[in-house]
Image (cartoon, grey):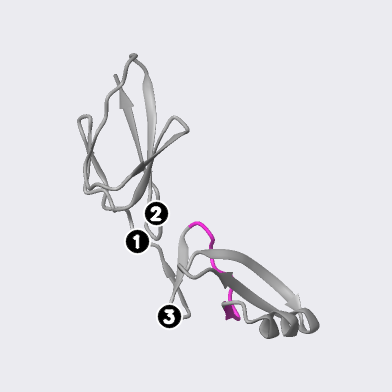
């Protein structure tokens, strides 16, 4: 017989999903790791709150012109792969060269917000 589990960290981030044999399941239970039993969570779309798997909320971040607003704090602003930590609710964007820029706002537990800026 097998058991489905979802492991998660202190923030509720799902770190692993697995289907385990009874023996391996017992090992995980005895290890004291945080888990939800009987279900596989989705590592991208869900997280764990009070031992229940729930949907991650949409990011409140919005892009208005060249200004990111309603940023969750703290967050990580990623521009074309370069990461910039941000501790404020607003970020003014400035670009040296005309191009298309992919911008991602990452702040767990929110889903990533993705924007594109063409300058």
Q: Is residue 68 left or right of residue 39?
A: left
Tag on residue 50?
A: 3
Image quarter (top left, top right, bottom left or bottom right) of the N terminus: bottom right
Please tell me whether mark 1 sits on a helix, a strand or a loop: loop
Q: Alpha-carbon distance for marks 2 and 1? A: 6 Å
Between circles 2 and 3, the one closer to the viewer is 3
Question: Residue 40 magenta-drawn?
Answer: yes
Question: Where does the image place residue 67, in percent across and percent down from the top left?
Answer: 21, 34
Mark 1 neighbour density, 10 Å: few (under 14) some (14–19) many (20 or more): some
Question: Sequence-wise, which precedes: disc 3 or disc 1?
Answer: 3
Q: Residue at x 80, y 83 (%)?
A: 23
Q: Residue at x 29, y 53 (%)?
A: 73
Between circles 3 and 1, the one closer to the viewer is 3
CB contact under 8 Å: marks 2 and 1 = yes
Mark 2 neighbour density, 10 Å: few (under 14) some (14–19) many (20 or more): some
Judging by the rendered image, the residue that carries numbered circle 2 is 111
Extent of the magenta region: 35-44
Judging by the rendered image, the residue that carries numbered circle 1 is 57
Q: Residue at x 32, y 16 (%)?
A: 96
Q: Alpha-carbon distance for marks 2 and 3? A: 19 Å
Q: Alpha-carbon distance for marks 3 and 1? A: 16 Å
């Amino acid at each position: 017989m097998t058991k489905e589990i979802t492991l998660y960290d202190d923030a509720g981030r799902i770190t692993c999903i697995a289907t385990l044999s009874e023996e391996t399941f017992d090992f995980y239970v005895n290890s004291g790791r945080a888990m939800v039993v009987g279900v596989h969570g989705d590592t991208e779309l869900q997280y764990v709150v009070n031992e229940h798997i729930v949907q991650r909320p949409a990011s409140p971040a919005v892009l208005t012109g060249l200004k990111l607003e309603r940023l969750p704090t703290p967050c990580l602003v990623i521009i074309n792969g370069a990461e910039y930590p941000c501790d404020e609710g607003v970020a003014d964007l400035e670009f040296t060269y005309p191009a298309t820029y992919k911008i991602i706002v990452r702040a767990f537990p929110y889903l990533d917000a993705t924007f594109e800026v063409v300058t």
